Image: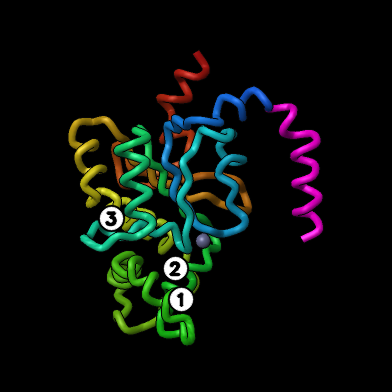
Amino acid sequence: MDHIVRGVLNFRKNVYPEHKDLFGALADSQNPDVLFVTCSDSRIDPNMVTGSHPGDLFICRNAGNVIPPHSNETGGMTASIEYAVAVLGVRHIIVCGHTDCGAIKGALDIPALKGLPHVKEWLGHCRSAMEIVRERHSIPSDTCLDSKYMDEAIEENVLQQVQHLRTHPVVAAKLANGKIEIHGWVYDIKSGNIRCCGRDSMEFMDFDQYYSDYIAKISE
Ligand SMILES: [Zn+2]
C-alpha cells in the first residue's frame, strides 16, 4: 500500500497542479466520446494505451470484458451502457479483450472453477465463444479446451460480447441510425499491439489496417 499512499501525495503535490485547468473544466460535467469496456486485469491501462486523459473515456471493467446480453434484469453493465449511450451520448464503444486473460482461462475449463460459483456463472456469458472454438476444432462440448486455443478464444469472446452489446435497446437504436460505432479490440500485453474488428468486418486485423482511414486523416 506504501506506493499507493506515496502516489496520492505526489498526485496532490505535483500532478494535480499541472493539470488544474483540466480538472477544473471537468469538475461539473463530462462529455466522453468513447465507452471503453475492458477486463479488470491489472495490466490493462486504457488511458495509457490510448493516450487519453480524464474525461475522454467512460470505462466499464469486469472479469473477461463481459457484456451480459440485454434482459429485464438490471445489472451494473446494463445500467452503465444505458447511461453512457443515452445520457452521455458516446459515439464509439470499444470492447477490449487482452492476451493471457484469466477469465478466458477459466472459461476454457469451467468445471475446474470449483469454489468460485459467481465466477462460474459470470463466465457463462462467454460460453457461446468457447462452443464456437470447440465446433471449429471438432472438440466435444463437455471437454475442456487446451490452452493452445487461448488466443482464438479471446478473439471469439470479444466477438460474442460485441453481439451481446447489440442486444441492448439503446445501442440497437443508435446503431440503426448510424450514431454509434462498435469496435472490438484484443490488446497484446507483451507486444503492445492491438488487433481490431467490428466496423466493417468481424475479421480481426492489425490496428494500422483497421484504422487506415483515421491514420490517413491524422497524417494529412
Ligand atoms: Zn482478463
Q: Residue at x 75, y 54 (%)?
A: 4
Q: Residue 149 got which mark?
A: 2
Quarter residue 161 falls in: bottom left
Which residue, as the protein is rendered here, is positioned at the far front? 28
Q: Earlier in the sequence, mark 3 or mark 1?
A: 1
Q: Which residue is mark 1?
A: 146
Which amino acid type corresponds to the residue marked 1 in the rendered image? Asp
The span from disc 2 to disc 1 (Cα, nearest Å) is 6 Å
The span from disc 3 to disc 2 (Cα, nearest Å) is 22 Å
Q: Indicate whether 38 appears above or below 214.
A: below
Q: Position of residue 119 (x, y in %)?
A: 44, 74
Q: Earlier in the sequence, mark 3 or mark 2?
A: 2
User: CB atoms at circles 2 and 1 under 8 Å apart?
Assistant: yes
User: CB atoms at circles 3 and 2 under 8 Å apart?
Assistant: no
Disc 3 residue crowd, few under 14, some 14–19, many 20+, Cα 10 Å: some
Q: Is residue 7 magenta?
A: yes
Q: Is mark 3 within 8 Å of ligand 1?
A: no
The span from disc 3 to disc 1 (Cα, nearest Å) is 25 Å
Res. 151 visible in picture: no
Q: Indicate whether 61 appears above or below 192.
A: below
Q: Which residue is mark 3?
A: 164
